[in-house]
Amino acid sequence: MRSTAYGPEHDAFRKLVRDFLNREVVDHFPDWEQAGVVPREVFVKLGELGIPGLQVPERYGGGGATSFKYNAIVSEETARAGVSLGGLSVHMNVVLPYFLAYGDEEQKARWLPGLAGGELMSSIAMTEPGTGSDLAGMSTTARREGGDYVLNGAKTFITGGINADLVLVVARTGRGGDRRDGLSLLVVERGMPGFERGRNLDKLGLKAQDTAELSFTDVRVPAANLLGAEGAAFGYLTGNLPQERLSIAVAAQAAAEAALETTLEYVRERRAFGTPVSSFQNTKFELAACATEIEAGRALLDRALGEHDDGALSGADAAKVKIFCTELQARVVDRCLQLHGGYGYIREYRIARLYADARVTRIFGGTTEVLKTIVAKSLGL
């Protein structure tokens, strides 16, 4: 079945992204996986095409797109090509919305042109070593001293943390009656004294995506780098979660589709007992089941993309989509790897990389278990 989410204008953009990946990324990607990071110049080249700033207004050097579907196409095409672009998805789909929604005019003029052009890369630092999904329990603090905030604390699992020039740090600036009160967003810039990047974490998958530990020791952050109102960050964070979770669902669905495509190619070529693996009934049944589930995921995702563009995608519905598409990804990739036999366990085969990359999607952006509680609450439970 053909996706109902996209039209001719999206097809033209998809070709632009696909051509770029084939020209600038595919042949170099194994080296980036070895290095654990995507070279900075790649983001500048993407900026020349207008990709990092698709949704940034034109007056700040962006593309001015109002539809999230263009962002989704970038994720889909990277999955199709069997590559990743490091922290680009977090930069585009998670961080930029905060600058667009809560930045004042001076902040937008100062940062958005660089963010749109790929000269400035961004990340968001929420997760702490002892809190995980419990954002309200974070202990990173920022106290006001004159014209600055003095920031202290540590963050971990920060996607894009090595390459980031601007890190949007969630810190506790005060206390209120509710433990969710008193959190603020501070923009920490590369080179600020006391801001240190720790290890680029050695992960099971997503090898080219830099994921860092960050520490802040008496970092003086100018009050002009406070994004939005002091103490209002928890509400900001929950407000952007539908798009963040939708973006993860897009990547998961695309990865499942890529797993099916690569497995179909493999089973047609691979022979066992003198006959193609594709001729066995078990192979046919397994891949037919995968194809059917993928169609269901695509239908759900297409509907969610439309509702998001209309401003109607609720937090609970975004949670449903992420649960379904990431769990679908896990099932499909596992079944496809099984059909590769022993070769499926070798990283030079694409299915092995898809398998390793898939495991984290049920964790970041809200674990499946946390999201189920959100869905249950929407049911009045």
Image: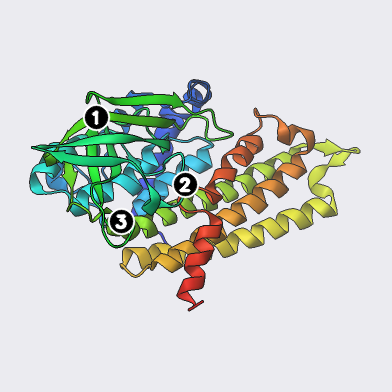
Examine the rendering and report whether any part of residue 53 can be seen. Answer: yes
The type of colouring in the image is: rainbow
Q: Residue at x 56, y 61 (%)?
A: 324
- Distance from disc 1 to disc 2, alpha carbons, whole Å, reads 23 Å
Q: Residue at x 50, y 24 (%)?
A: 27
Residue furthest to the bottom = 380
Which label is found at residue 243?
Answer: none
- Distance from disc 1 to disc 3, alpha carbons, whole Å, reads 23 Å
Mark 1 or mark 3, which is nearer to you? 1
For residue 134, side relative to residue 328 (left or right) = left
Front one among 314 and 13:
314
Of the two numbered discs 3 and 2 on the same chain, state the one appearing first in sequence. 2
Q: Secondary structure at mark 2?
A: loop
For residue 273, side relative to residue 292 (left or right) = right
For residue 359, side relative to residue 214 (left or right) = right
Identify the amino acid type marked 3.
Phe
Q: Secondary structure at mark 1?
A: strand
Give the labeled residue for mark 3: 234
Of the two numbered discs 1 and 3 on the same chain, state the one appearing first in sequence. 1
Which label is found at residue 132?
Answer: 2
Front one among 294 and 280:
294
Identify the amino acid type marked 2.
Gly
For residue 174, side relative to residue 323 (left or right) = left
| Residue 56, x across and y down, in percent | 21, 47
Front one among 183 and 28:
183
Examine the rendering and report whether any part of residue 4 can be seen. Answer: no
Identify the amino acid type marked 1.
Asp
| Label 2 Cα neighbours within 10 Å, binned few <14 / some 14-19 / many ≥20 | some
| Residue 317, x across and y down, in percent | 45, 68
Which label is found at residue 218?
Answer: 1
